[in-house]
Amino acid sequence: MRKIIAAMKVSMDMKFQGPEGYADWVDGWSDDYDLAPQIDACLLGGQMYRGYERYWSAMRTNPHDPSPMTGTIPTSAELAWSSRIPDLPHYVFSRTLTETQWANTHIVGSSADIATLKAQPGKDIYLMGGAHLVRRLIDEGLVDELRLITYPVIAGGPHSLFGSDDTRHSAELVAVRGLPRGLIRSDYQFSRQ
């Protein structure tokens, strides 16, 4: 069975975005998660997908221009990812989104749809976020692995990856790696009873 691997960039206080509504400490996309070779599909929440589609569509249209969302020139890793996007099926978990601009994008409306997708043959699935979908799928036992890149910043604000409910999940730390600029990558596997 395919694995669903959630991968997110967070602050030291486990925030996925700051008080202004975005992760201003993240300086660009890269495959520091080492996921690209082992995945053949992406899964996103509806709210995250809207920004994701805008960001990568702009980069694909004007690859040498600054991003309208960040004001920065795309990195070589971002350009490589943007060229791969049309070949990767994207699945968007949403109850309100009815259409997307990208041809290879499919809307799913239930956790059962995601379980069915996971049971299909293929490589692993990259769960990009958003945080609410990551938390939900962890709670439902559908996430097999969580890869976090922690930035050396305390972001503050209310947007914590794991919220404040009483749900507890056991995970095994399987790898830790230091990255440039003081970043740390931590990989966890969830145990299933």
Image (cartoon, rainbow, N blue to C red):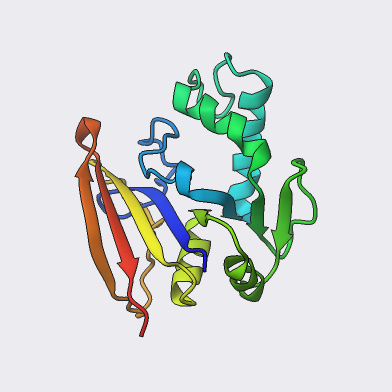
Q: Nearer the viewer, residue 125 or 158?
A: 125
| Outermost residue toward the top in this view | 64
Rendered location of residue 60, percent (x, y): 65, 25
Q: Residue at x 46, y 22 (%)?
A: 76
Quarter-of-image position of residue 153: top left
Image quarter (top left, top right, bottom left or bottom right) of the C terminus: bottom left
Q: Residue at x 42, y 67 (%)?
A: 144
Rendered location of residue 171, percent (x, y): 29, 70
Q: Nearer the viewer, residue 43 or 25?
A: 43
**Number of residue marks:** 0
Q: Residue at x 44, y 58 (%)?
A: 5
Quarter-of-image position of residue 27: top left
Rendered location of residue 74, percent (x, y): 50, 22
| Outermost residue toward the bottom in this view | 193
Instruction: Please give left or right for residue 151 compared with residue 140 in the image.
Output: left
| Outermost residue toward the front in this view | 121
Q: Residue at x 29, y 56 (%)?
A: 187
Rendered location of residue 112, percent (x, y): 64, 76
Quarter-of-image position of residue 46: bottom right
Q: Nearer the viewer, residue 10 or 175?
A: 175
Q: Is residue 106 visible?
A: yes
Q: Is residue 129 visible?
A: no
Instruction: Please give left or right for residue 172 compared with residue 146 in the image.
Output: left
